[in-house]
Image: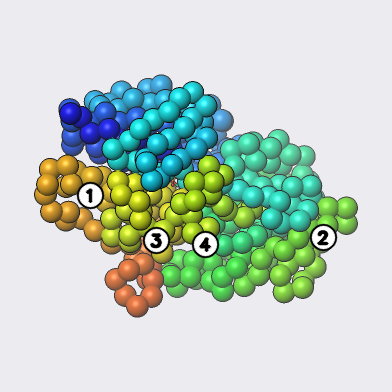
Amino acid sequence: MKLGIVVLGAGFGGLELSTILSERMGKNIDLTLIDQNDSFYFGFSKLDLMFGRRSAKAVKHSYSSIVKQGVSFHQETITAIDPESRRVTTDKGIYQADILVVALGADYNLEATPGLAEGGNEFYSFAGAERVREILPGFKKGHVVVGVTSTPFKCPPAPSETALMLHEYLSHQGVRNSCKISLVIPFTLPIPPSLGSSKALLKAFAERDINYIPENMLESIDPLQKIAHLDDGTELPFDMFLGIPEHVVPEVVSQSGMAVHGWIPVDQKSFKTSYPGVYAIGDVASVGVPKAGMFAEGAARVAAESIIAEFNNDQFLLPFNGRGSCYIQFGLDQVGRVDVDFFSGSSATGIYHEASEALVDEKASFESSRRERWF
Ligand SMILES: Cc1cc2nc3c(=O)[nH]c(=O)nc-3n(C[C@H](O)[C@H](O)[C@H](O)COP(=O)(O)OP(=O)(O)OC[C@H]3O[C@@H](n4cnc5c(N)ncnc54)[C@H](O)[C@@H]3O)c2cc1C
């Protein structure tokens, strides 16, 4: 009998997990991979899209090209998950799993921040990034605020990258001198575990005249007056607000009862939930690391190892180590990298690799290698 695995979500985590299981036990599995979309895109490609560097078509990778032993992809919307019975309902059918893996990522709740939907622009969703791409060319002067509304949020360096890429975009448009850029983030340092990365970013902000507002978040927006109210009481007038909205589990996850304090709790080493045979990986789970593709991928490797070990009655030998790397886009031809370690010491640490053209190539091959492996 083949092992019936149902993987919910074909993002970073779901794709990596399905790929490993196909490679290692393709003959012995019947794996159903379900996603509501017809294609995958990398999180960072939303920034490329927003600043007009790449088209929507160029950053989307169609799930129809997934051909893997033991794996079948279904484009369906998941409407209910029963973790006790490992039964999943979609808009097209019902699936019963021996092993269920929840990899549904994080959604956004714009309503949590009064005025954000009316007076601001979120750019963390694909549709949001596309909307900003449409309005940016018309922006010739004024104050742009890039601001975080709550924690946790995906890819902690992304707001800083956005401010730097915005500077580059406005400079190329020839309007930078008529524009002011402010960046509102909740931390003291742009990348708290890494002093080296933070210093490099603070230097880049200073050189580019980006107004850095640390230890603060957006509380609300007055859409008529165009004023951002920060949580320390500061009022920040703006002409364009680029917001990072509150992150939440997808509704189907919150309805399943699996989330506790906002996210699905898992065993930090194996990504098993408290429900037998049910794993949760990536942004949807809470495990003490940032919400980032690199960590979702790491979680997928560990969960896959655990599934394979149990199937073979072997010992599970690859507990999650809380390590990962994030690229930091300083501009078109400058990318830095931070290697972070969340579990080894008493607090998280991060080693910075200075921005260079070599890291531009490394980031590009990171993307192309996943594309080749997953599709
Ligand atoms: C602007 C931006 C920049 C980023 N830059 C980086 C970066 O440089 N490096 C990095 O490592 N990370 C980056 N990230 C973060 C990264 O994209 C996410 O952390 C990563 O995608 C999480 O992987 P995941 O598998 O948990 O979820 P996702 O990749 O979000 O996948 C979840 C999948 O579940 C599907 N889904 C959800 N609900 C349903 C439903 N009801 N039915 C069917 N399908 C459903 C979705 O369609 C989606 O495909 C960035 C994110 C953003 C927004």
Marks 3, 4: nearer the viewer: 4
Q: Residues within 10 Å of mark 2 (few under 14, many from 20)?
A: many
Which is nearer the eye, 91 or 289? 91
- Determine whether 57 is above or below 236 in the image: above
Which quadrant is the C terminus positioned in? top left
The residue to which callout 4 is attached is: 261
Which residue is tagged 1? 306
Relative horizontal placement of residue 27, taking residue 245 as reference (left or right): left
Quick one: label 2 or label 4, which is nearer the N terminus?
A: 2
How far separated are the C-alphas under marks 3 and 1?
Answer: 16 Å
Look at the numbered discs 3 and 1 and tell me whether their residues touch, using CB distance below 8 Å. Answer: no
Q: Amino acid at mark 3?
A: Val
Label 2 CB sits under 8 Å from any ligand 1 atom: no
Asked if one can make out residue 302 in the rendered structure from this viewpoint, the answer is yes
Q: Secondary structure at mark 2?
A: strand
* Mark 4 crowd level (few <14, some 14–19, many ≥20, 10 Å Cα): few
Beta carbon of the mark 1 residue lies under 8 A of ligand 1: no
**Could you tell me which secondary element the residue under label 3 belongs to?**
loop
Disc 2 or 1, which lies upstream in sequence? 2
* Residue lying at 37% horizontally and 64% vertically, measured from the top left: 340
Residue at (43% x, 35% y) in the render: 88
